[in-house]
């Protein structure tokens, strides 16, 4: 009887060990594939975000255009709101990412 328990326990331990090894291998594959690719895409997006932010920070005309766009998108900011916070508000509300107004929509405001 005691020997049966040991065999069953050993079989169960081996099965669990194999499953854990498979999960570990799957995690490594995911990290080296999907996660790495997602991070590379994310960094590419962030580079674009920073490039636009740097342009807006450097050029008054573009900052004014950005502020006007926020008004068109009905994203409210204060005159003293920093550019970074304005940018965050646009991202958080998702309006810029989801739907920017077209030229035709500027004349059709109700």
Image (cartoon, helix red, strand yellow):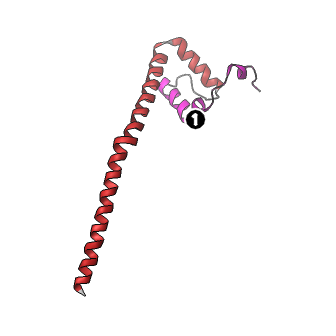
Position of 44 relative to 15 (above/below): above
Q: Looking at the picture, tell me which residue is in the foreground, 30 or 78.
A: 30
Q: Quadrant of the N terminus?
A: bottom left
Q: Residue at x 42, y 28 (%)?
A: 44
Q: Quadrant of the C terminus?
A: top right
- Magenta span includes 107: yes
The image shows residue 46 at horizontal and vertical percentages of: 43, 29
Left or right of residue 48: residue 2: left
Q: Which residues are magenta?
A: 82-109
Q: Quadrant of residue 96?
A: top right
Secondary structure character of the magenta stretch overall: helix
Q: Residue at x 61, y 19 (%)?
A: 68
Q: Looking at the picture, tell me which residue is in the foreground, 3 or 53.
A: 3
Q: Residue at x 49, y 17 (%)?
A: 56
Q: Looking at the picture, tell me which residue is in the foreground, 78 or 90.
A: 90
The image shows residue 21 at horizontal and vertical percentages of: 29, 58
Quick one: label 1, few (<14), some, or many (20+) residues within 10 Å? few
- Magenta span includes 36: no
Q: Residue at x 67, y 22 (%)?
A: 102
The image shows residue 93 at horizontal and vertical percentages of: 57, 35
């Amino acid at each position: 009887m005691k020997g049966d328990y040991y065999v069953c326990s050993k079989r169960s331990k081996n099965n669990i060990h194999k499953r854990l090894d498979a999960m570990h291998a799957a995690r490594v594959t995911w990290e080296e594939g999907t996660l790495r690719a997602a991070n590379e895409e994310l960094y590419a997006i962030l580079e674009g975000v920073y490039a636009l932010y740097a342009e807006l920070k450097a050029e008054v005309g573009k900052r004014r255009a950005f502020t006007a766009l926020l008004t068109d998108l009905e994203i409210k900011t204060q005159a003293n709101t920093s550019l970074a916070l304005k940018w965050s508000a646009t991202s958080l509300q998702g309006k810029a990412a989801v739907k920017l107004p077209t030229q035709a929509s500027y004349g059709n405001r109700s």
